[in-house]
Amino acid sequence: MARARRSGPPAAAPMGDERAVELTRRLAALLDELSLSEVEVESGDIRVRVQRAGALAPVTPGPAAADEHPLVADTVSPALVTVEAPMVGTFYRASSPTADPYVQEGDVVKEGQVLCIIEAMKLMNEIESKVGGRIARILVENGHAVEYGQPLFLIDPQP
């Protein structure tokens, strides 16, 4: 089963939602067919990411509830700016375990403001916002490993 979560404002036209649903279904089938853990595709103005998540319950009850690897799908608005990891390392939301996080979801940030730290080879690298705006979503948990190019934050740029 697939559980879809949308971030950002809802699509203006129902046609875009139908395209997102169809793309999500195709990606979920591809995920199972190829035994992948995650797949992300951008098609026109729609971006969909589907990944396996063992802790989530399926959307519909019944025989599908026995599926031990339900799917999670994210549809991201093209208006949001993605801040990606510039390196492989460990993601930290604060400068120390006892410090407050640099940012929270909903915070307004300026271009160049520090959003997080990525520790790589015992060096702490501050990751700065590339645009001013509001933090729409934080995509990585504190202390988790990140890959080069992995999305870390979604920012809704201010006009």
Image (cartoon, rainbow, N blue to C red):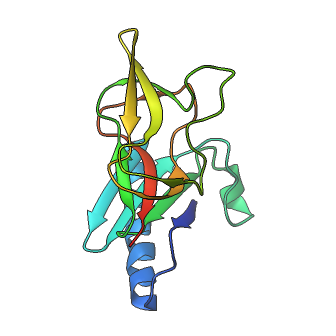
Residue lying at 59% horizontally and 51% vertically, measured from the top left: 70
The quarter of the image holding the C terminus is: bottom left
Observer-nearest of 123 and 77? 123
Residue at the farthest top position:
122
Query: Residue 26 in the image: x percent, y percent?
Result: 37, 65
Q: Residue shown at 70%/53% (left/top)?
A: 57
Quadrant where the N terminus sits is bottom right
Furthest residue in direction left, as rendered: 44
Residue 100: quadrant of the picture: top right
Q: From the top left corner, tell me how far across and down residue 142 is, in percent.
A: 58, 31
84 to 42, vertically: above or below? above
Residue drawn at the location 63% of the way across and 44% of the way down: 68
Q: Can residue 86 be seen in this view?
A: yes
Horizontal side of residue 101 vs 122, given as left or right? right
Say if residue 28 shows up in the picture. no
Q: Residue 95: percent from the left, percent from the top?
A: 55, 23
